[in-house]
Image (spheres, grey):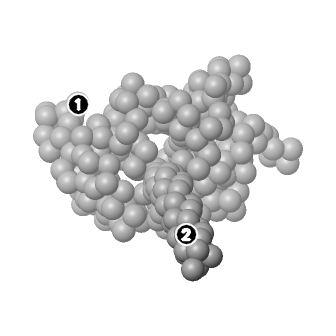
Amino acid sequence: MMKTKKGKTKIKLKKLLLFLLMVVLAIALLVFGTEKIVHLATGRMHADEAKPTYYLFIGEDETAGSEADAMLLLADNDKKKEMTFISIPPNTKVIRQEKTNLLLKDTFKEGGAEETKSAVENLLHIRIDKYAVVNYADFRENVSKAGLISLYVEKYMEHLDRDGSFDIGLNQGYQPLDSEQALGYVRYVDKEDGEIGRIQRQERFLKIFLSHLQSRMALRNWLTVRYGFRAVESDITPSEAASLAYRLTGYPPEGCKFIIFPGEMQTIGKVRTWVVNPVEAQKVLSLTME
């Protein structure tokens, strides 16, 4: 009879130990699982790495024979909670043995996004992780999901398309812009400030657009981009784009920097060309790292 009681006691003790072990494992899995989910949701599996992730965004003007008329390099440094937006003039000079005065926008016509991506990598001596090509329709669709964007239009802006009708018509003054008007604002070029002036307006619009996104809930931005991001061509998955938008929402405003790739405008063979300053360019890239 005593042996039976001892046997039952041992069985109960084993069950208790097994139960406690299961509780400990459950807590460990819960903690680990929660942390992993957060990392996956925000795309921060490599947060401990000092090097930034580089994204290249190419704006395509299909009305001009599928020409690349805007290029933006985004350096996302999650460890520093910083994003650096580097605008690269499309008429930037590219050094290539067989062509002495090849422009960056010409590489897009020759070999598409992959050729342009390779040219930017060689120019900056970096590895671009992801890219996306966005046309006018994509721009309008992506901006429209954020709602009206209010800003001050510095001057009256107008432009006639090839058919002689207005495709840009903006009055001077502070006003809310819908996606079509926003496209006109970032496209507009005048004789006074030329291409660099347009890039400055693009940066200005981007700053206001990002500020608008950062005023919203991070989850809302994640959902909007996850199920609404559009591009003609891209190797950025919807989840990756959504994670980028999620992280951006949490970065402090001072962590977002806007830079025009260093250089100067020169006339080479009657063509207005942006010639890169290599020393200043390396200083800019160093800002994106530790």
Name the residue at 31% across, 54% down.
Answer: 219
- Give the structural element (helix, strand or loop) at label 1: loop
- The kind of residue on which mark 1 rests is Glu
Q: What residue does disc 1 label?
A: 154
Quadrant location of the N terminus in the rendered image: bottom right
**Image quadrant assignment for residue 25:** bottom right
**Mark 1 crowd level (few <14, some 14–19, many ≥20, 10 Å Cα):** few
Name the residue at 37% across, 47% down.
Answer: 187
Say whether residue 205 is left or right of residue 34: left
- The kind of residue on which mark 2 rests is Thr
- Give the structural element (helix, strand or loop) at label 2: helix
Name the residue at 24% across, 46% down.
Answer: 216
Of residues 159 and 269, the one nearer the viewer is 159
Q: Is residue 171 visible?
A: no
Q: Where does the image place residue 170, in percent across and percent down from the top left?
A: 19, 44
Q: Which mark is residue 9?
A: 2
In the image as oriented, which residue stretches furthest toward the front? 1
Q: Where does the image place residue 161, in percent across and percent down from the top left?
A: 33, 58
Of residues 287 and 156, the one nearer the viewer is 287
Front disc: 1 or 2: 2
